[in-house]
Image (spheres, grey):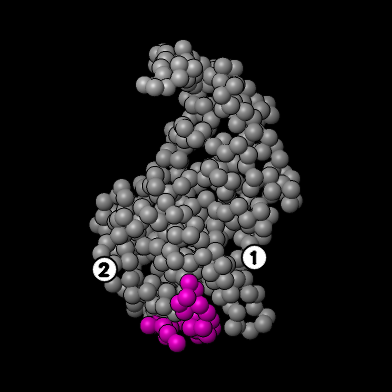
Amino acid sequence: MSKLVQAYDLAEYEDFINQEQFAGRPLAEYVAEVQRIYCADKRPWVIGYSGGKDSSAVITLVYLALLGLPPEMRSKDVFIVSSDTLVETPVVVDLIKKTMLQIEAGAKRNGLPITQHAVTPKTNETFWVNLLGKGYPAPTRSFRWCTERMKINPVSDFIKDKVSQFDEVIVVLGSRSSESASRAQVIAKHKIDGSRLARHTTLANAFIYTPIDTWDVEDVWKLLRGAFRYAPEDIDEWESPWGGNNRPLWTLYMDSSAQGECPLVIDESTPSCGNSRFGCWTCTVVTKDKAMESLIKNGEEWMSPLLKYRDLLAFTTDPANKDTYRNYKRRTGKVSYQYAKDGEDRSAERKHVPWPLLAQIPPAVVKRLTGN
């Protein structure tokens, strides 16, 4: 049986940590690994928190590992950062805000160097400024202008700021190989030989650590549900080590048909939310927002106007409707033409390529949004 390297403040968790298996290994081995990497140098950690199950599991694992260290070894900062696009699904935003405050309060109570930080896009990069102010069409698979502006840049700026303060940082993510094969391949490509760390794909002096990359979804829920399995019966089995409760997260997944979470997007290799996961309620990259539809069916009827509005935006992206909603002049006054490529059918050509929304569309969309 594997034992913890350090178990300073883990008396009530020790049996669970030593006995429960995750991806064929005792949880103790993962806790010990986190402790070892944390204590190996002075580089602070930035943990990406999306509000979903995987990032919640990573925070739980790191929190347990720090609890196990004696106070004098809890020597460097751990920044938990969440990215709010300002058009996130409201129920997810509420859960994130509540959880972040609970984590920070628990860390203060337990003497852990953990702080929480929320980042948002710059005003000129927000969804509404680009859609209504600049006339951008609603995002599509071929023109997904939102991800970099609203997700990648705010997190990257936060990481860059920490790099400027500390020279190097370690970014801790809840990426799992079974959840995203493409993401796993990218991380593996940048892996440092003989290390559990990988180089960040775009940010110099930032390194990636994925402590639960071998776990499956059952392992994730086991940790979120069972941290108190061996504790007294009067303690809720869903309780987190910082004093929060993971049952609302479980309920959220159940009410949305367990569609999955939108990962914290830190670079373009991270898949953005275009596959019915929790993400922006305005997302038009998908044909239907199945997660929001399921939430409404399971009691969140107040979100129905948001879904109808999203569907209206999606309607404007239909190729059959472009002539109705899009202007053929770009904002610069230029007109673009689309020619068939070599060997391509001439029917692929367009005399004009539609670009921004027609000038009369944004006011109509604003009226529908505000009710005025």
**Residue type, mark 1 in image:** Arg
* Res 214 seen here: yes
**Residue type, mark 2 in image:** Gly
Residue at point 55%, 53% (across, down)? 261
Between 310 and 243, the residue placed more toward the observer is 310
Element assignment for label 1 = helix
Q: Is residue 18 magenta?
A: yes
Q: Which residue is mark 2?
A: 194
Residue lying at the far front of the rendered structure? 343
Residues drawn in magenta: 1-27
Between 233 and 26, the residue placed more toward the observer is 26
Label 2 – label 1 distance at C-alpha = 38 Å
Q: Residues within 10 Å of mark 2 (few under 14, many from 20)?
A: few
User: Which x, y percent locates residue 337?
Assistant: 42, 15
Q: Which residue is mark 1?
A: 247
User: Which x, y percent locates residue 326?
Assistant: 54, 19
Residue at point 54%, 56% (across, down)? 51
Q: Which of the numbered marks, if any, corresponds to residue 65?
A: none
Question: Counting residues from the N terminus, which is met first, the one under dot 2 or under dot 1?
Answer: 2
Quarter of the figure with residue 76: bottom left
Do labels 2 and 1 touch, CB within 8 Å? no
Quadrant of the image containing the C terminus: top right
Is 251 left, or right, of 60 in this rendering? right
Quarter of the figure with residue 165: bottom left
